[in-house]
Structure formats: C-alpha cells, structure tokens
Amino acid sequence: MQTAIHDDILKQNRFNMIEQQIRPCNVLNQNVLNTLYALHREDFVPVSQKELAFAETRLMLDENTKMLTPILEGKILQVIDLVKTDRVLVVGTGSAYLSACCANLSTHVTSIDINDMLTQTAITLLKEQNINNIDCITQSLEEHLKQALNHEFSYDAVILTGSIQSLPDNFKALLKENGRLFAVVGASPSMHACVFYKFANDLRVDNLFETELERLIGFEDPIVFEF
C-alpha cells in the first residue's frame, strides 16, 4: 500500500515538473515531453536527493559537478531536435539523465566525462534501466576532439553541458554535414544558449536564450592577476 502511494506521489511530481515547470517555458515538442515522462528523473539522482529530483535546482553529484535543471534539460532536448537516426555526443555525462533522454530520441549516444566515478555510476544506472544504446567513456573533450580531427568519427548532434567563452573553429570536426551543436557561450553575466549548424564545412549560429553554466572542464577562463 505504501509503495503504491509513493509511486503515485512520484507520478504526480513528475507530471507537475513537466506540465507546470517545463511546458510553460515553451518546451512543446511532444517527443521531448514523452521522453521526460518515460525516463524517471528520480532514478538518476543521488539517493540522498531523490525528494528534490523534480525541483528546479542544480543537484550536486559530487563536490565539483551539478545536474542541469529540469527546464534547461527540456530546452536543450527541444532545440537540438533529435531524430531516431541521429548519432549524438554528450560532453559531460554527469548523472547520465540527459544522455538517457538523448538515447530515447536517437539511435546512439556517446557520453564522455573526465570523472571516472561519474562514468562508472552512469554505466551501472543505464544497465539497470536497460538502456543499451549509450557508450559512457572517461575521456576529456580535448582527447575526443583529437580523434575527430583524425576523421575517426563525427556526430549528427553534440551537446556541451558546460559553458565556453567562444566556440573554437575546430569543433566543427565533431559534426557531420548539417549537424548541430548546443553550447552555452559567453561570460557571466551575459551567457547565451546557442545552437551551431554545420553547412559546407562552416558554422552558423543561432542565439536562443540567456542562461548560465559553469565552464566546461578544460575550457576554464585564464586566471588574471592584478597588481
């Protein structure tokens, strides 16, 4: 009886997250909303924070890593506009929830993170959820980019889960022709979520909305000394 009541509470909280938080922020793509219903966010958060799984807050995964908020996850999934034939790269595995959502919307996801503990936790979680079309790898973006520059692979869609000052031109090596890349670009207090599109080996950018994220590991701002 208590289990049924608990499940009903989770179901209602999930409904509230999607219908009262995410949808009102103009996340209207039904495939995205269906994915958010299908994948239970509470299964991807630390046990100690499960009661906060649906809250619009950045949950701590370790001392240096936070989950994205539900609204930002929904917005990312909408603007990257995945289709079932897409091969996707997620940079910053974190909780693996965003990667799992991408996997539900595409054919395959490669998810990289520099933190091996997060990678191993993600592998275990995804196995428990029977999500088999994700490869979680402990690797830096710089290392992955070197492989892409050697023409070892490319993707239909790339998602950066940390911010960068500006997008380096060589990032286009990660993308197939007509591919797109989501990134939060700029410096606080003026960062923008952007999607970059690759056409004729060049990049076109759409500035979409204001938001803020900590820097992507390996792309931190240089320390400025004042004398």
Image: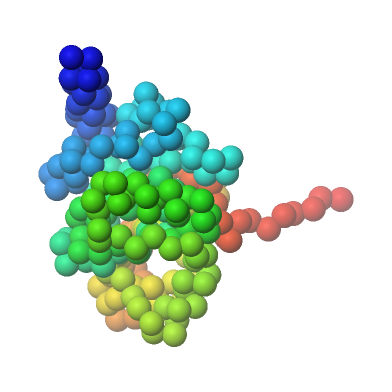
Q: Quadrant of the N terminus?
A: top left
The residue at the point 39 percent across, 60 percent down is: 136
Q: Looking at the picture, tell me which residue is in the foreground, 219 or 66.
A: 66
Provide residue 79's location: percent of width, then percent of height: 26, 52
Residue 140 shown left or right of residue 32 in the figure: right
Provide residue 82's location: percent of width, then percent of height: 21, 58
Q: Residue furthest bottom?
A: 150
Residue 100 shown left or right of residue 64 in the figure: left
Residue 199 shown left or right of residue 56 in the figure: left
**So how many labels did they put on this image?**
0
**Colouring of the image:** rainbow
The residue at the point 20 percent across, 60 percent down is: 106
The residue at the point 30 percent across, 51 percent down is: 127
Q: Quadrant of residue 58?
A: top left
For the question of whether residue 194 can be seen, the reply is: no
Q: Looking at the picture, tell me which residue is in the foreground, 148 or 26.
A: 148
Provide residue 222's location: percent of width, then percent of height: 68, 58
The residue at the point 19 percent across, 44 percent down is: 35
For the question of whether residue 83 can be seen, the reply is: yes
Provide residue 36's location: percent of width, then percent of height: 22, 40
Q: Does residue 198 lie above or below 94 as drawn?
A: below
Q: Residue furthest front?
A: 1
Q: Does residue 56 lie above or below 212 as drawn?
A: above
Q: Does residue 6 lie above or below 185 as drawn?
A: above
Q: Looking at the picture, tell me which residue is in the foreground, 224 or 12.
A: 12
Q: Residue furthest left?
A: 30
Residue 129 shown left or right of residue 4 in the figure: right
